[in-house]
Image: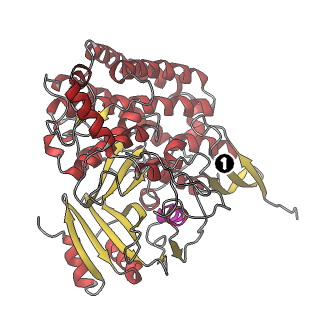
Amino acid sequence: MAMTETMTVNMGPQHPSTHGVLQLILELDGEVVRKATPHIGFLHRGVEKLSEYRTYHQTIPLTDRLDYLAPMSNNLAYVLAVEKLLGITDEIPERAKVVRVLLAELTRIKSHLVWLATHALDIGAMTVFLYCFREREHIMDIYEKISGARMTTNYFRVGGLSADLPDGIVNEISQFIDAMPGHIDTYEGLITGNKIWQKRIKGVGVISAEDAIDVGLSGPALRASGVDWDLRRDDPYCDYEDYDFKVFTSNDCDTWGRYQVRLLEMREACKLVKQAIAKLKPGPVIADLPKVCLPPKQDVVNTIEALIHQFKLISEGFKPEIGEVYQGCENPKGELGFYLVSDGSAHPYRMKIRSPSFINLQALPQMVVGRMIPDVVAIIGTLDIVLGEIDR
Amino acid sequence: MSENAAVGKLKAKFASSVLDVAEFRGETTVTVKKEDIVAICSFLKKEVGYNFLTDLCGVDYLGKTPRFMVVYHLYNIGTKERLRLKVPVEESDATVDTVTGVWSTANWHERECWDLMGISFNNHPDLRRILMAEDWEGHPLRKDYPVQGPDRRPYQGRIS
């Protein structure tokens, strides 16, 4: 009888978003994975610890750097948590809320574009990568015009936005959004019907609804296992309940299902952006709460009083009352949550980030066991992880 | 605000375990004894429907007794309700029973809590450091751990 023994190999980095900070140790029986052990923590930047030594305003730029493929969404989750802690959720101006939705959905498209690009590239489809990054560049240009930065936007503020939208940007976003469904058709035309693509992802990385909930999956990864749950609808923020949108699920529970769900979400995000643009009305973009909100940017650059006010608010901060809150947001990768504990001082006493990539990655070992090595690549891609968010 | 339905059920079933119930900004926080955490979590999952463990972490209240709190954020996907559970943990006995048997997602959460806060979890299947290196000394999220890392003088400048 032939003797078999397992072999242990190091795998990675292979996925662009893991860029050397995810080590995967695989125990292989031939080409079949018997055990997978992810090793993380190579990037650990101590965001939670740093926040304890900063004011609430000063922490906002740290949040950009978590999921740097969706910085606006991270900003949003954090400022919503601070607003909840302060009890000023009802004071946010209408225009600020609409712009937040607009940019959160644009960010969803941007993040999903990187997922599709890199996932397809992992599996060998080079052209989709180039097309997706072309569209992503357009969103980065829009980001730059709005916030001054392409990646680390730092645009949302406690109480609203750092500045109003620049002139002409709404038209540019409209044009982009009008063209986007056509681009998605192109991606689908390239790969959805492709036999190789289908064979690489159908039935790969199957996880049942029960297991997905048990292991804590959230976002598209959970919905692709048939769980109809979306925080935008089920625990709404930024008046999402006033928007007309669908939550997509798939009963395939595999990489194909997650691919389908994310593509549908991109199309739905386009509709949400359009609705947000239709809702945009002139008005203030930051709440009139001088004790906690920064003065309008225009005043800061034109008057010494506003400049002093901004300086004091940023450096000395504000002091929320003693208490603790948790705010979760439906980010492109799943539920991003901030748990803030206030001791009444100007710094968060404790900030815990519930990062979706960290928890989604935990499902990897059970999804790859019994699969072949190339499937591991497809499964890491379908989880859509970003190590900045895992290591924090 | 009316009392959370889960709190009523919890009080009825584990009357002696519930130490405190607090409401803040519409969120309910229940503090329970750490000895009963596994039984309480099992009850909340099976009988009350809190099937999703959103998050688990530790908070260091240095200088207070007990020093630590382990915080569990639960979510009921069916009723869309949240509940926060807390268990006080003494510094001299910084251990809590693992809830990985209730929700397997607790595995990495508890590893992270052990790694960064130094709270150990009894019966955990794989309690290793997760973010710090294996030979790292200390637990960085403890309040008495210097922000700039070990072997560094405390920061003397202005930290706003």
Q: Does residue B66 show up?
A: yes
Viewer-proximal residue among A41 and A27: A41
Farthest-out residue, bottom = B16
* B54 inside magenta stretch: no
Q: Position of residue A98 (x, y in %)?
A: 21, 31
Q: Position of residue A344 (x, y in %)?
A: 26, 58
| Camera-nearest residue between A25 and A162 | A162
Can you identify the residue that label 1 sits on? A23
- The quarter of the image holding the N terminus of chain A is bottom right
User: How is this picture coloured?
Assistant: secondary structure
Residue B121 place in picture, x, y as percent: 51, 74
Q: Position of residue A335 (x, y in %)?
A: 37, 48
Could you say which quadrant of the image residue B17 lies in?
A: bottom left
Residue B107 counted in the magenta span: yes
**Residue type indicated by callout 1:** Gln
Highlighted range, magenta: B105-114
